[in-house]
């Protein structure tokens, strides 16, 4: 699928989305209120029928972004446009109707399933809440769903603890699919599973997506997890989206130094590629006190004075390739090369932005 085809319409447009939390912790006694910028001015589109992978280190705001898009939490500001309407303006009633179209699959397949209910009740509840089916009709629908996700329909009366981790995640997927949604946020759906089971669940999602024409936002920690399933990949760092492009372009010609550094640590069969491994210095700063200018500049091997003064704009630096960086890598340029160049010519702040 090519997301840049002209007939490809965005299903969702996320515009300048922010989610700030007021937390205690500042000041000498730790009593002063601080603002934690969990999601800070994020804009992107999700195309109909695509799988958009979203990666980034723990705490960078992936789950918060997913939850705010679905309005499971109310954003501080911004817009989420669906069907040409900003759903952040929706009333409770309008939101309830929309819930059918938008679902979530959680990371923890145990914690997200109530242990006191059978899976028949857990999945069947979706039909009852929305007044779609009850009794035998409900049971028939749930059993069909169980079959669809590769579970034995005879397990209708079993409890969550009677299933393996991978099977429980299939229950979570069945529940998300019950109302035939258009859009699903899968928030680290395989992170809690054994590696051997991860690919089975990912393959199931790929199949279901094709069969049901779903649009997916697939959240994961690492780039290697999203590669197989994603049409495009977005990379987050400290509340911001730093890069977004089609999967091949992200993996073969990353533009943001953070993405390039992350990629250099993905296990590669190619020993040449391993030699290029770049370890980022320091820790991720707190989203309650992010650095001035560019959020990544305290760890960026290419950062200059400009990066501490001016936050880089989010812009299309190549065709369909979005980056927020003052010095994005050129096509074919490696981060190692760029670092070498920077050392040789520290004064020359080569700005590779392709100006439109
Ligand atoms: N309800 C809340 N109140 C205060 N801070 C919060 C709240 N929810 C999230 N945060 C903070 O927002 C930031 C982003 O959290 P989030 O859970 O979105 O990260 P994540 O990228 O999903 O991390 P992980 O990979 O560990 O799941 C973190 O610093 C987190 O502590
Ligand atoms: Mg998370």
Image (tube, rainbow, N blue to C red):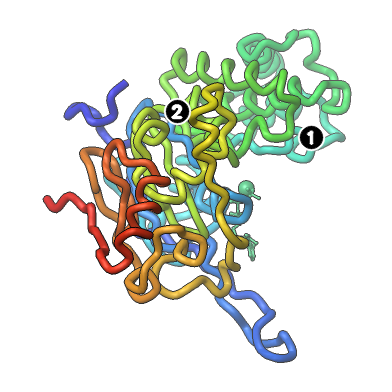
Q: Position of residue 252 (x, y in %)?
A: 38, 31
Read off the residue under disc 2: 230
Q: Residues within 10 Å of mark 2 (few under 14, many from 20)?
A: many
- Which of the 4 quarters of the picture holds residue 259? top left
Within 8 Å: ligand 2 and the Cβ of disc 1? no
Q: Residue at x 28, y 41 (%)?
A: 321
Mark yes or no: residue 253 visible.
yes
Query: What x and y, as percent, mark residue 119?
Result: 77, 24
Q: Position of residue 314 (x, y in %)?
A: 30, 56
As drawn, the label of residue 276 is none
Q: In which quadrant of the rendered image does the N terminus lie?
A: top left
Q: Are marks 2 and 1 in contact (CB under 8 Å)?
A: no
- Describe residue 151's horizontal placement relative to residue 45 as left or right: right
Q: Residue furthest front?
A: 344
Q: Marks 2 and 1: which is nearer the front? A: 2
Give above or below for 237 relative to 161: below
What residue is rendered at 63% in x and 51% in y?
A: 58
- Give the CA distance from mark 2 to mark 1: 25 Å
Q: Is residue 12 visible?
A: no
Task: Identify the residue at horizontal 66%, vertical 19% (top origin).
Answer: 138
């Amino acid at each position: 699928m090519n997301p840049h085809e002209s007939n490809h319409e965005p299903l969702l447009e996320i515009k300048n989305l922010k989610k700030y939390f007021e937390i205690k912790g500042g000041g000498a006694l730790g009593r002063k209120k601080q603002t934690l910028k969990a999601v800070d001015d994020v804009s992107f589109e999700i195309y109909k029928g695509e799988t958009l992978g979203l990666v980034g280190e723990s705490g960078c705001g992936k789950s918060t972004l997913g939850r705010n898009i679905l309005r499971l939490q109310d954003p501080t500001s911004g817009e989420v446009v669906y069907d040409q309407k900003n759903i952040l303006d929706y009333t409770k009633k309008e939101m309830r109707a929309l819930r059918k179209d938008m679902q979530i699959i959680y990371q923890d397949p145990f914690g997200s399933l109530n242990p006191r209910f059978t899976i028949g009740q857990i999945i069947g509840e979706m039909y009852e809440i929305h007044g779609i089916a009850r009794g035998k009709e409900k049971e028939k629908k749930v059993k069909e769903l169980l079959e669809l996700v590769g579970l034995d329909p005879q397990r209708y009366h079993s409890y969550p603890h009677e299933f393996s981790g991978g099977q429980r995640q299939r229950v979570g997927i069945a529940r998300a699919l019950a109302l035939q949604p258009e859009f699903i946020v899968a928030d680290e759906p395989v992170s809690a599973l054994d590696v051997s089971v991860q690919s089975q669940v990912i393959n199931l999602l790929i199949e279901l997506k094709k069969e049901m024409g779903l649009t997916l936002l697939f959240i994961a920690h690492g780039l290697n997890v999203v590669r197989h399933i994603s049409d495009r990949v977005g990379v987050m760092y400290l509340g911001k989206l730093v890069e977004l492009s089609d999967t091949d372009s992200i993996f073969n010609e990353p533009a943001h130094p953070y993405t390039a550094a992350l990629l250099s640590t993905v296990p590669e069969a190619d020993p040449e590629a391993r030699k290029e491994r770049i370890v980022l210095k320091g820790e991720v700063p707190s989203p309650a006190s992010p650095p001035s200018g560019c959020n990544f500049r305290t760890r960026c091997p290419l950062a200059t004075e400009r990066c501490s003064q001016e936050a880089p704009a989010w812009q299309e630096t190549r065709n369909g390739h979005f980056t927020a960086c003052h010095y994005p890598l050129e096509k074919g340029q490696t981060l190692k090369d760029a670092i070498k160049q920077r050392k040789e010519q520290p004064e020359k702040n080569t700005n590779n932005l392709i100006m439109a």
